[in-house]
Image (spheres, grey):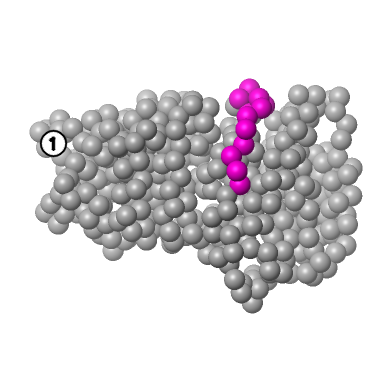
């Protein structure tokens, strides 16, 4: 396993003290860090909490917390394989019974939210506690368009944010994730995101979702959509491929979420400018036909042709078309139909077309969450299409 640097602020006696909860923090400005620590201190007045932060904080500032410095997680915008590997090793080192991993800007979560996540993995049968956020309109759309629908349709999960940066882990959940992460570390691919919800589901572990309210959105430093979408989508596609024996079996799906329906009112005047995204899609429609024709069946290409000829508010991508596009790209990723980097790059303008459609639909009065649940339902309906093409890619002609 990867080597973990010793925790320098702990005495030998402290290192041998059992810890109820181990809290691992991402690097963040000192003001944010103090806000997180204050919320943790308010949540756990009786103590039993060890907080590992990359920045030194005087321990007497929060006497009911045991605070030490440790290397930061890479959780600037999502958790990576190495983060879970390190988390389990640190939990064993500190004899922790559960882990709370918090991303940057987690100071925007109040004390009750942190307590809910921690209590779930400390005192209930929940192995994985995942945050559900109340984000601003049109935030987190890669999650809404691809990650959430795939997770729901293939793993029967109702978790709205499968890559939530703030999660709680039981010790056995942390161990399972560490084993999965070790495979990536062995091939020097530790920066790959892991999929805790998928791992928990396949293992039969209990997953809990907790509404934690508003959160300051994490902004990746440097990488934009052209980097983020291929990274997270490619990682999820690989995980789906590895777990194909599980998700191809029939399982009852949870009901679609109805929380927060209708909370988005009067958003049309704040809608993003769709013109650059439409132009990017139309340019790609002209230049990427050769790649798309290797991945998509004629029926999907015809649907895209019609879409490219549509203007303004009438630009609407059918949910079923989007679901089949994602499924066909997943299949092409598995079969290595073309170079995977080129494949995922070719998905970006199609995603932008979905975003334009999403903005137009919601600007017409449909609630944002309502439309996203409609997309999820389309992924459910089209799962048989994916399974057929997955099992018989050469014989099945859509």
Left or right, residue 116 beside residue 16: right
Relative height, residue 49 to residue 154 (above, below): below
Relative height, residue 347 to residue 274 (above, below): above
Relative height, residue 219 to residue 232 (above, below): below
Left or right, residue 110 beside residue 264: left
The secondary structure that dominates the magenta segment is: loop
> Does residue 56 show up?
no
Left or right, residue 159 beside residue 281: left
Work out which residue is located at the far bottom of the displayed protein and give it. 269
User: Which residue occupies 21% across, 53% down?
Assistant: 41
289 vs 209, nearest the viewer: 209
Left or right, residue 327 beside residue 165: right
- As helix, strand or loop, the secondary structure at mark 1 comes to helix
CA neighbours of label 1 inside 10 A, class few (<14), some (14 to 19), many (20+): few
> Does residue 255 show up?
yes
Residue 217, given in percent of the width and then of the height, sits at 47, 60
Q: Which residues are magenta?
A: 244-256
Image quadrant of residue 361? bottom right
Residue 188, given in percent of the width and then of the height, sits at 48, 31
Residue 301, given in percent of the width and then of the height, sits at 86, 47
Q: Which residue is mark 1?
A: 14
73 vs 139, nearest the viewer: 139
Residue 84, given in percent of the width and then of the height, sits at 40, 35
User: Which residue occupies 84% across, 25% down?
Assistant: 394
User: Which residue occupies 70% across, 42% down?
Assistant: 379
Relative height, residue 18 to residue 61 (above, below): above
Image quadrant of residue 387? top right
User: Which residue occupies 87% across, 35% down?
Assistant: 398
């Amino acid at each position: 396993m990867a080597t973990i640097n010793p925790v320098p602020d702990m005495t030998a006696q402290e290192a041998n003290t059992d810890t109820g909860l181990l809290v691992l923090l991402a690097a963040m400005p000192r003001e944010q860090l103090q806000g997180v620590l204050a919320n943790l201190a308010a949540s756990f007045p009786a103590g039993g909490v060890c907080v590992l932060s990359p920045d030194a904080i005087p321990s007497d500032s929060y006497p009911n917390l045991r605070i030490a410095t440790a290397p930061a997680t890479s959780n600037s915008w999502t958790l990576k394989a190495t983060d879970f590997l390190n988390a389990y090793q640190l939990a064993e080192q500190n004899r922790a019974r559960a882990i709370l991993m918090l991303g940057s800007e987690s100071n925007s979560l109040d004390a009750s939210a942190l307590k809910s996540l921690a209590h779930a993995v400390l005192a209930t049968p929940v192995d994985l506690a995942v945050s559900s956020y109340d984000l601003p309109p049109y935030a987190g759309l890669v999650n809404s368009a691809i990650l959430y629908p795939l997770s729901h349709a293939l793993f029967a999960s109702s978790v709205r944010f499968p890559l939530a940066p703030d999660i709680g882990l039981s010790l056995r959940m942390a161990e399972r994730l560490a084993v999965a992460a070790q495979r990536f570390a062995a091939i020097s691919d530790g920066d790959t995101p892991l999929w805790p919800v998928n791992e928990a589901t396949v293992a039969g572990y209990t997953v809990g979702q907790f509404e934690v309210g508003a959160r300051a959105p994490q902004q990746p430093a440097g990488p934009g959509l052209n980097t983020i979408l291929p990274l997270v989508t490619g990682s999820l596609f690989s995980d789906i491929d590895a777990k194909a024996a599980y998700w191809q079996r029939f399982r009852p799906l949870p009901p679609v979420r109805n929380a927060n329906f209708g909370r988005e009112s009067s958003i049309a005047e704040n809608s993003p400018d769709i013109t650059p995204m439409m132009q990017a899609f139309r340019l790609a429609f002209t230049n990427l036909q050769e790649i798309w024709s290797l991945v998509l069946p004629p029926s999907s290409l015809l649907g895209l042709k019609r879409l490219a000829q549509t203007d303004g508010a009438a630009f609407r991508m059918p949910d079923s078309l989007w679901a089949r596009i994602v499924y066909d790209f997943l299949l092409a990723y598995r079969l290595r139909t073309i170079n995977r980097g080129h494949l995922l790059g070719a998905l970006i303008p199609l995603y932008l077309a979905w975003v334009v459609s999403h903005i137009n639909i919601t600007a017409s009065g449909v609630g944002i969450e309502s439309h996203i649940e409609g997309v999820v339902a389309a992924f459910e309906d089209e799962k048989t299409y994916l399974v057929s093409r997955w099992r018989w890619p050469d014989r099945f002609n859509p």
